[in-house]
Image (cartoon, rainbow, N blue to C red):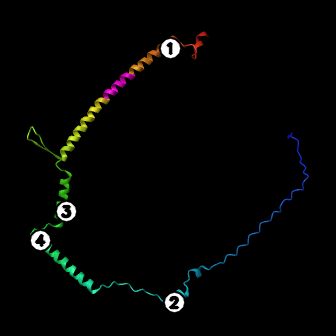
Amino acid sequence: MDKMPEVVIESDTEEEIEPEIEPEPEPEPLPEKVQIDVDDVFKKSEILENAPTIKKPKRTRTMTPEALEKLAIARAKGLETRRKNKELRQKGEMPTPTQKKDEKKKQEMEAKRPVVNNVVHKTENITNNITHDDIIKITKKASQEALEEYEVKRKARKQAKKVKFEEENQKTIVKNKINSALGHKYGQEGFFDVCF
């Protein structure tokens, strides 16, 4: 099948000597696995069994006599202060910790709902005290009115869009009827159907 002639090139130069390929050295055989007895693995060594256990003494912190004196004085002062505060609470001169918490919560609640605006009108001597609740009511009313107004406008746009769509739809129906009555134009598919 091959119709190309074979070309043989003879060279006058010495024949090329192919380098000898050195065979790869064979890998050394692995040493045989040594079988270990399972009992020997879990057996405690004699050295560990006979070894004495050394317990380290727990380090205790010793206080100096000066530090002990200062600590005794601080404890005495704290005890005296607690007793004095207890007597004041029983007399009603000092609030209890729960009363302090209640007072703090009350102050936080008042801080959250402050009087926002104290306006005195120049023409009328009336003061308007607007609280946080009043602002919420005014905001809700204003947002409700805005939403209703937007809804009216949206419905009007939707109605106008629907009327426009119906008019365009009616125009396309009339146009299609006229074109079907006229027949096919030259160049359109089916123009020559009337000839056959």
* Residue 170 located left or right of residue 196: left
| CA–CA distance in space, label 2 to label 4 | 69 Å
| CA–CA distance in space, label 2 to label 3 | 65 Å
In what quadrant of the picture does the C terminus appear?
top right
Above or below, 90 against 165 in this view is: below
The furthest residue to the top: 195
Amino acid at dot 2: Asn
Mark 1 vs mark 3: which is more N-terminal?
Answer: 3
Residue at 20%, 44% in the rendered image: 135
| CA–CA distance in space, label 1 to label 3 | 89 Å
The magenta span reads 155-165
Name the disc covering residue 88, or none: 4
Q: Position of residue 78 (x, y in %)?
A: 19, 76
Q: Which residue is mark 1?
A: 180
Label 4 environment density (alpha carbons within 10 Å; few <14, some 14–19, many ≥20): some
Quarter of image, res 172: top left
Mark 2 vs mark 4: which is more N-terminal?
Answer: 2
Label 2 environment density (alpha carbons within 10 Å; few <14, some 14–19, many ≥20): few
Amino acid at dot 3: Lys
Above or below, 182 against 18 in this view is: above
Name the disc covering residue 50, or none: 2
Q: Position of residue 9 (x, y in %)?
A: 89, 48
Q: Which residue is mark 3?
A: 101
Q: Position of residue 116 (x, y in %)?
A: 18, 47
Residue 164 lies in the magenta-colored region: yes
Residue at 22%, 38% in the rendered image: 141
- Nearer to me, 175 or 104: 104
Mark 3 vs mark 4: which is more N-terminal?
Answer: 4
Q: Secondary structure at mark 3?
A: helix
Mark 2 vs mark 1: which is more N-terminal?
Answer: 2
| CA–CA distance in space, label 3 to label 4 | 18 Å
